[in-house]
Structures are given as structure tokens and as C-alpha cells.
Image: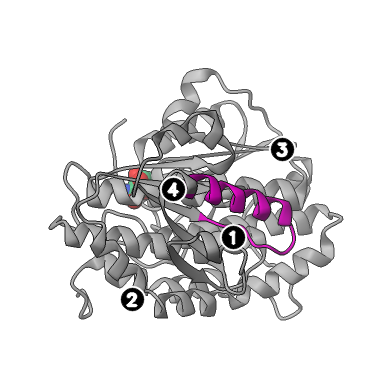
Amino acid sequence: EKGGYDYFMLKEIAEQPKAVADTLLGRIDPSGSLTLDEVRISPSELREVDKVVIVACGTAFHAGLIAKYAIEHWTRIPCEVELASEFRYRDPILDGRSLVIAISQSGETMDTLMALRHAREQGSKVLAICNTNGSTIPRESDAVLYTHAGPEVAVASTKAFLTQLVACYLVALYLGQVRGTKWGDEIQAVIKDLSRISEEVERVLETMEPVRALARTLASKNTVLFLGRHVGYPVALEGALKLKELAYMHAEGFAAGELKHGPIALIEEDLPVVVVVPSPRGRSVLHDKIVSNIQEIRARGARTIVIAEEGDEAVVPYADHLIRIPVTPTLLQPLVATVPLQVFACELATARGNEVDQPRNLAKSVTVE
Ligand code: M6R
């Protein structure tokens, strides 16, 4: 049932192009607009929403962090993202105009379930983004948008994450479509880009051999740091989480702009630092800033592992290892930038002799608080 792969995780990484395509299937109509009929919250209710709050745990939380950029950009509705385990303990401000989005692969995560119950008690509508049909979280929500990743067996979430991102983009674009936004043309273009993204993920998967080879050379390291900016920051967090849970290494993700506020003190000779580089097109200020961050850490001896768009030549002089990803719109970059990090963590775990599908101390779904 592992389909010829050594681990479910490898199989699930490889299934991502299909998972992404399946999650889009039937949701973009031929005219290029979105039909999310399953979202049983009426357009008029969606037009009333004055705040979006996303609750989730672990990898699903990272999807939520990325969704915030998309939702705020395309809809101009303020969006907060909170760890479900923290949410209800701080008396969050919610009412009937808040839309709460609960993201969960399993649909059984107790922290997320308790958070959504709390939100509904405050009169908010809850939309679940979930991968498991008929599980508790969608059953207790007002509406659900299913991700179509298929069953995910490996404890480390991969294809569920990519499809959560796709679902979040769909919700963001749909909210934009329903409410009308000045980004109308951009939304149309992004919908087109989204429908091509499965092929881009496929292309990334075809170029992963150097990433595996690199991971094997790092098997005896104790620490790996991950840096990103903008949507690359949650990608860095996700890369670090994958490495912790699979390789049992100390791994931390930072917003690159925070380096000089403390973390740069951690940089020492030959410390591997993975940097997710934003596109040089569009918001090029971010790109230039991260290039100087890479210079700074390299000058202090870091071994830089740079994930950058094809054609981005500015990073070349400062990259000890360069991992290329396809050109994508800024907000969609996490769909391609996360894949090398999954492969990297999986290979490091294998090189360290760890059990890839069942990391120690972890369960696939965490049904206790
Ligand atoms: O089933 P859920 O999406 O609600 O699970 C949330 C987290 O427990 C989950 O993403 C966890 O962090 C994964 N093991 C990450 O790979």
C-alpha cells in the first residue's frame, strides 16, 4: 500500500501534484470564477464579515499563517491567526460578524475542536477546512471546504498542508469575489496561476535529488535554522517543524528581519541556514532585504542553503547550496517552496536512522488537549 515507496511520507510527498489538482477540481468554473457551493455561508453573510480568525495547530497553523497574507491582501478584511490551544484561554473578541476558519487534516484535533466550539458559543460562524470526510470538526462547523488530499498516513503532514494552502487561497479569493475588491483583475490572474500550480509542484519534485544528497551530508549536525520573510516566514516555520519531528534535530524558523534582534548571535562556522527567498519580481524590496540577510549570515560563517526562484541571479554569489523553485506569484510561492523542505527533512530522518512515518512521541491526530 506504500505504492513502491519506502515510506508513506515519500508516497504522500509524491502525491502532492494530484492532491493540489484534486482540491481545485470543480471549484473553478470555465469562466474563471469560483464556485464554492459547499460553503454554506451565504454571500450576504460573507459580505457582513468584518474579521477573520483562523485557528489550527502545528502544520495546519502554518497554513493559516500563510492564509492571512492572502485574505488580507485580496479582501482587506483583518485576519488573525491563532494557535487553537491558546485561543479560548484568552477571552478572544468574537461576535456574529467574525468568520472563524478552523483548519485540520484529521478533523479530530481536540485543541481545534475546543476553539471552534468556543467561537460558535460567541455567535461566530465557523468554516472548517478539513481533509477527513465526516470527522468531528466539519460536523460541528457551520460549513466545510474539504481538501482532497486523500488519506494521509505519515504522521508528518505534507500533502494535507499543500491542499490546506489551496483551500485557504480559494476561500480568500472567494471572499474577494463575493465582496468585490479592487484586486478583481489580479484575482482572475491568480485563479489561472493556481490551476497551473500542480504542474509546478511536479517540476519541483523532479529536481529533488540534490536536496537529498545535501541532506545526507548534514546528518551529524545538531542545529538547522530556517529564515523567511512575508509568506516565506511561515514556510520557514514549517521547514523547521518537519525537521524537528522527523530528524529530532534542533530546528528553528525565524523571520529574516528579526535576525539582528537576537538570532544572529546563534550563527557560527558551518551552521546550516536554509533561506526562503521571495521573488525578485513584484515586492522586490523584500528580495533585496533577504539578499543582505544572506550576506550577513554568510559573513559570519553560516552554510547557506538558499531556496530561490529560477532566474534569480542575485542570490548566486552567497549561496553555498542553491535550490531552484519555479517562478510563481508571491502569495502562491509557499506551494512550491515547502516541497524541498519536506524532502530535506525526510531524507535527514532516514540518514539518521529514524522511523520516518512514525516519529517518536507523536500521534497522527492529537485527540487530547
Ligand atoms: O489533524 P490536524 O491538521 O488538526 O493536526 C494538526 C497538527 O497536529 C499536525 O499538523 C502536526 O503538527 C503534524 N504532525 C505536522 O507534521
In the rendered image, residue 255 lying in the magenta stretch gets the answer: no
Query: Tag 3: residue type?
Result: Pro
How many other residues sit within 10 Å of disc 2, few (<14), some (14-19) or many (≥20)? few
Residue at the image position 55 percent from the left and 52 percent from the top: 232
Span shown in magenta: 276-298
Mark 1–mark 3 contact, CB under 8 Å? no
Separation of residues labelled 3 and 4 (CA atoms): 27 Å
First-in-chain label (1 vs 3):
1
Please state which of residues 187 and 285 is positioned toward the viewer in this rendering.
285
Report the disc number at residue 78.
3
Mark 4–mark 1 contact, CB under 8 Å? no
Query: Tag 2: residue type?
Result: Glu
Q: Is residue 34 left or right of residue 8?
A: right
> Compared to 121, does 15 lie above or below?
below
Q: Residue furthest right?
A: 182
Separation of residues labelled 2 and 4 (CA atoms): 20 Å
> Compared to 28, does 366 lie above or below?
above
